[in-house]
Image (spheres, rainbow, N blue to C red):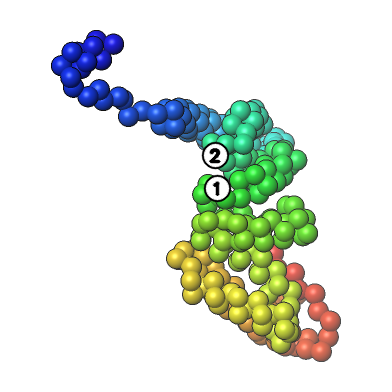
């Protein structure tokens, strides 16, 4: 008010503050995003602390059992992250419909499957239904290849196609293409039309992607399938059976053979 009076007396133009309602909203949004980010970091730290304690307790009990010569007591192989997961879900609800929800939903989708399968699936669905254009999906791309397994073939394939069509992020679209095409390559013979078309699309993605990790995975998959794919002759392997008799895989050529690969760590 004093400034306006002085300007009027001196005949000077009055310069108003450049802040408009829009810029004020942006300031509020930035503040809200900072709060959401801090909340996410705190929850992520809580999850890591909970996991580390669970693992440490397990190792302590294992060591004690070995020292005492007793059996290891029964323990759940799933870390007790339920209470932390509930906090992530509450945060996702608090920020529902906003970009700030994406980081919480992504954590739930990636880390919550063993704890709350329905909750993790719901997080996936919300991400693809409401946040398909979010740059935050970059944190989820390596989970795309399991999408049909988690959501079912029909729904998973539909969401992958939606990501390819609507995401503004090239890297996200390329990972979605990789996830969509991989099952076709896995389940088609090398001389089939389906394999030829999928491999051609694979090559296009390999040539255009800027992700070295994605390119490496795609090139490896093509080499693997062209060596061990359906219809290919398996490389000859040799070994010794339980009676100490040497054998080769080619010894069983023309016979139906079940090969079971397993290991013990």
Q: Which mark is residue 16?
A: none
Q: Specify few, some or many for label 2: CA neighbours under 10 Å numbering under 14, 14-19, or 20 or more.
A: some
Relative height, residue 91 to residue 152 (above, below): above
Quadrant of the image containing the C terminus: bottom right
Residue in view at x 64 percent, y 63 percent: 179
Residue 3 visible? The answer is no
Q: Residue at x 59, y 74 (%)?
A: 202
- Residue tagged 2: 99
For label 1, count other residues whose C-alpha is less than 10 Å away and answer few (under 14), some (14-19) or many (20+). Answer: some
- Residue 101: percent from left, percent from top: 58, 36
Label 1 near label 2: C-beta < 8 Å? yes
Residue 220 placement, left or right of 25: right
Nearer to us in this view, 50 or 126 = 126
Quadrant in the picture for residue 8: top left
Q: Position of residue 151 (x, y in %)?
A: 75, 52
Provide residue 156's location: percent of width, then percent of height: 72, 57
29 to 188, vertically: above or below:
above
What residue sits 46% from the left and 64% below the top? 211
Identify the residue position indicated by label 1 in the image: 134
User: Closer to the camera, 241 or 149?
Assistant: 149
SS at circle 2? loop
């Amino acid at each position: 008010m004093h400034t306006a009076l002085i300007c009027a007396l001196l005949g000077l133009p009055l310069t108003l503050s450049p802040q408009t309602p829009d810029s004020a909203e942006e300031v509020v949004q930035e503040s809200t995003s900072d709060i959401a980010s801090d909340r996410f970091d705190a929850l992520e730290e809580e999850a890591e602390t909970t996991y580390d304690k669970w693992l440490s307790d397990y190792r302590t009990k294992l060591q004690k059992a070995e020292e005492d010569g007793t059996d290891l007591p029964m323990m759940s192989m799933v870390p007790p992250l339920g209470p932390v997961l509930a906090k992530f879900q509450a945060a996702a609800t608090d920020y529902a419909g906003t970009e700030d929800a994406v980081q919480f939903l992504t954590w739930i989708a990636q880390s919550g499957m063993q704890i709350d399968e329905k909750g993790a699936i719901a997080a996936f669905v919300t991400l693809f239904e409401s946040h398909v254009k979010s740059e935050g999906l970059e944190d989820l791309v390596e989970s795309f290849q399991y999408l049909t397994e988690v959501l079912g073939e029909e729904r998973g394939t539909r969401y992958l196609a939606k990501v390819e069509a609507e995401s503004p992020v090239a890297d996200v679209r390329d990972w979605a293409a990789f996830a969509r095409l991989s099952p076709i390559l896995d389940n088609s013979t090398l001389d089939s039309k389906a394999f030829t078309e999928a491999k051609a699309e694979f090559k296009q993605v390999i040539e255009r992607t800027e992700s070295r990790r994605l390119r490496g995975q795609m090139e490896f998959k093509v080499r693997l399938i062209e060596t061990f794919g359906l219809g290919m002759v398996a490389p000859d392997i040799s070994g010794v059976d339980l009676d100490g008799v040497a054998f080769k895989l080619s010894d069983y050529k023309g016979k139906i053979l079940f090969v079971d690969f397993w290991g013990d760590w």
